[in-house]
Image: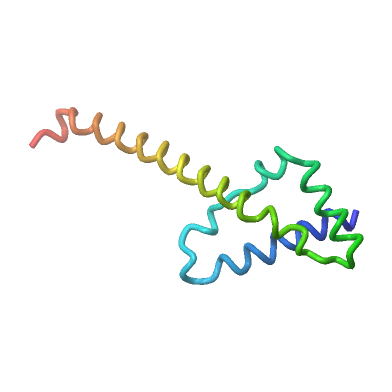
Amino acid sequence: MSQGRNGRTAWALFYASMLRPGHGLAGYLSISRILRAAPAKYARACVYAERDNSDLSHFVGDQPQILLQALDDLRAYRARRARAVQGIEDVLQGSPCTAR
């Protein structure tokens, strides 16, 4: 049980540091789906951290790749939302109520 807490603690500390002013959209990064996609890797890091006196450095090696994937996911989400907004604008531009 404590293995999961170590991992959650590491991510909580990371998120707390990223939510400081100046880190832009870091608060919108979602890692849960990424971690669920590779549960064995995450569990292994938890076991190693537990074995090594709660050494959270076992999570550090995977962080860059996880964060890059989370950034890609955020970019894709923003692109989908931008297309949706553009679609609404296109409809409104063709509306007789917005004719200029």
66 sits to left or right of 10:
left
Task: From the top left corner, tell me how far across and down residue 49 is, in percent.
Answer: 84, 60
Check the image and name the residue furthest to the bottom: 21
Query: In which quadrant of the rendered image does the C terminus lie?
Result: top left
Left or right: 58 as drawn, with respect to 3: left
Residue at the far left: name it. Answer: 100
Q: Residue 57 at x, y = what percent? A: 76, 64
Is 47 rendered above or below residue 33?
below
Tell me which residue sits at (83%, 54%) in the image: 46
Of residue 89 and residue 65, the one placed in the foreground of this image is 65
Color style of the picture: rainbow
Horizontal and vertical percent position of residue 28: 53, 53
Residue ID at (77%, 45%) = 41
Residue shown at 59% from the left, 52% from the top: 67
At x 45% / y 45%, what residue is drawn? 75
Front one among 56 and 24: 56
Please identify the quarter of the rendering in which residue 85 is found: top left
| Place of residue 2 in the rendered image (x, y in percent of width and height, measured from the top left) | 89, 58
- When the figure is inspected, residue 54 is found, relative to residue 31, above or below; the finding is below
Q: Nearer the viewer, residue 61 or 93?
A: 61
| Residue 99 relative to residue 23: left or right | left
Count the marks: how many? 0
Left or right? Give the position of 98 relative to 17.
left
